[in-house]
Image (cartoon, rainbow, N blue to C red):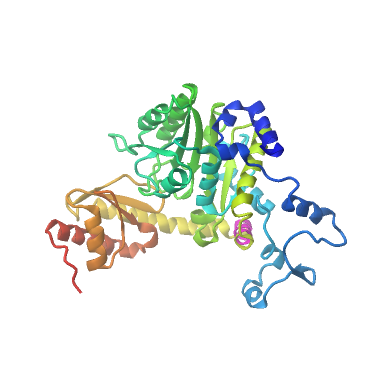
Amino acid sequence: MNPLAQQLNDTIQRENPRIAEMLSGIGRQIYFPKDGILSQSAEAKTKANVYNATIGIATENGTPMHLQVIQDKLSAFNPKDIYEYAPPAGKPELRTVWRDKMLKENPSVVGKAISLPIVTNALTHGLSIVADLFADTDDAVVLPEKNWENYELTFGIRRGAVMVEYPLYNEQNRFNAAGLRDAILSQKDKGKAIVLLNFPNNPTGYTPNAEDGRAIVAAIKDAAEAGVNVVAVTDDAYFGLFFEDSLKESLFGHLCGLHERILPIKVDGATKEEYVWGFRVGFITYGGQSAGTLAALEQKTLGIVRATISSGPHPSQTFVLDALKSPEFEAQKAEKFAIMKGRANRVKELLDSGKYGNEWSYYPFNSGYFMCLKLETVDAEAVRQRLLSQYGVGTIALGQTDLRVAFSCMEESQLEDLFDRIHSAVLDVKAGNTAVTK
């Protein structure tokens, strides 16, 4: 094993041996090269005051070389904030500004020990870092049965972990904290579980309320006290889009410092929060550990970044930072929130109107981008196909009964026509009319 990796492992083992037990094989072996090209280039950037012949970019007249046809479109920004490589951990100021934003929006994090957020290539990259560092073959990933399909690819296919599912809702149509607790405790013999908490949930658009949030934290603590090492990952992709009767902050802060066997990891980003999906700017933050352990986890994370993408895109980090610092940012974000909330409320109004009879029910939703219908009489895939062929409508079929509808990409004025078309397609399939007409 490389001496640098061993040093990081020794630090973690000394300061919290439970975290050391959570690391995967890759997690134990990975490190960020202190004497590599990037570290030597960083040193030269501060000390080479005559010539800096270290980094692999081209310069011209003291600035990064660039094509004017590109710079003309980006003239509001200094070439050094666009064309140079970003540091592997991301732009330092962006990391600090994102941390400050996190503390403002999540009061429960204030005063807790957390790492400085590390920039990722959006949230999937952040989750893949978690998988690389903590998931080995046959490790359990605990998640509700209504979940984002990419978890299986990221943790299951890539790392060989096993998905352990529990029902998202209990009999009262609230979050099934007891099911979560049982699923984690089912891994007591293995002594380890990776728990994915995705709120607002994709695909249902559901976020638990504060009481259920406390029950989730208690369930994870119960498992830790029973001897299970828990990697508790809050996938906060849709953070902030809380429309009614739900938690208004991430559970990350409540998990920080809760128990030595719990490692809270927050994965979030500008992707959905700031409506910049194509920018691919996300963050990963560790919490609840000593300064030495947090620093060691950061170094291992940078090792994964270096080994996979080297560093994230610089222009989009600059754009996001510029937006976060703008005095108009909060007002514009509030405006978009109001539009999204209006769409969600309109969907509920339509579904509760009685207009569509008993052809479907819907799963509780109060946040995010999506909602899910539960079709009572017909197959969801058949309805999806009918909607495409006859009504020009795209939806997502999940299993036999569930149909996911993204109200996020519909104008509020279009929603009634959308659900009218879905209802017509359901009636068509129910009547056996699935022929494609031209």
Looking at this view, name the residue that lies furthest to the front.
Answer: 1
* Image vertical order of residue 16 relative to residue 160, above or below: above
Q: Nearer the viewer, residue 283 or 252?
A: 283
In this image, 400 relative to 199: left or right?
left
Q: Percent x, y for residue 290?
A: 65, 31
Confirm whether the magenta stretch covers residue 324. yes
**Residue 251, visible in the rendered structure:** no
Main secondary structure type of the part rendered in magenta? helix
Total numbered labels? 0
* Image vertical order of residue 58 relative to residue 48, above or below: below
For the N terminus, the image quarter is top right
Looking at this view, name the residue that lies furthest to the bottom.
Answer: 69
Q: Which residue appears at 44% of the width and 24% of the height?
A: 189
Q: Percent x, y for residue 66?
A: 69, 72
Range drawn in magenta: 317-325
* Image vertical order of residue 262 relative to residue 51, above or below: above
In this image, 361 relative to 272: left or right?
left
Confirm whether the magenta stretch covers residue 70. no
**Residue 368, visible in the rendered structure:** yes
Q: Which residue appears at 43% of the width and 32% of the height?
A: 216
For the C terminus, the image quarter is bottom left
Q: Percent x, y for residue 289?
A: 62, 32
Looking at this view, name the residue that lies furthest to the left.
Answer: 431
* Image vertical order of residue 62 relative to residue 333, above or below: below
Q: Which of 225 and 37 is in front in this view?
A: 37
Q: Nearer the viewer, residue 311 or 289?
A: 311
Looking at this view, name the residue that lies furthest to the top.
Answer: 226
Q: Which residue appears at 19% of the width and 61% of the height?
A: 424
Q: Percent x, y for residue 309?
A: 60, 55
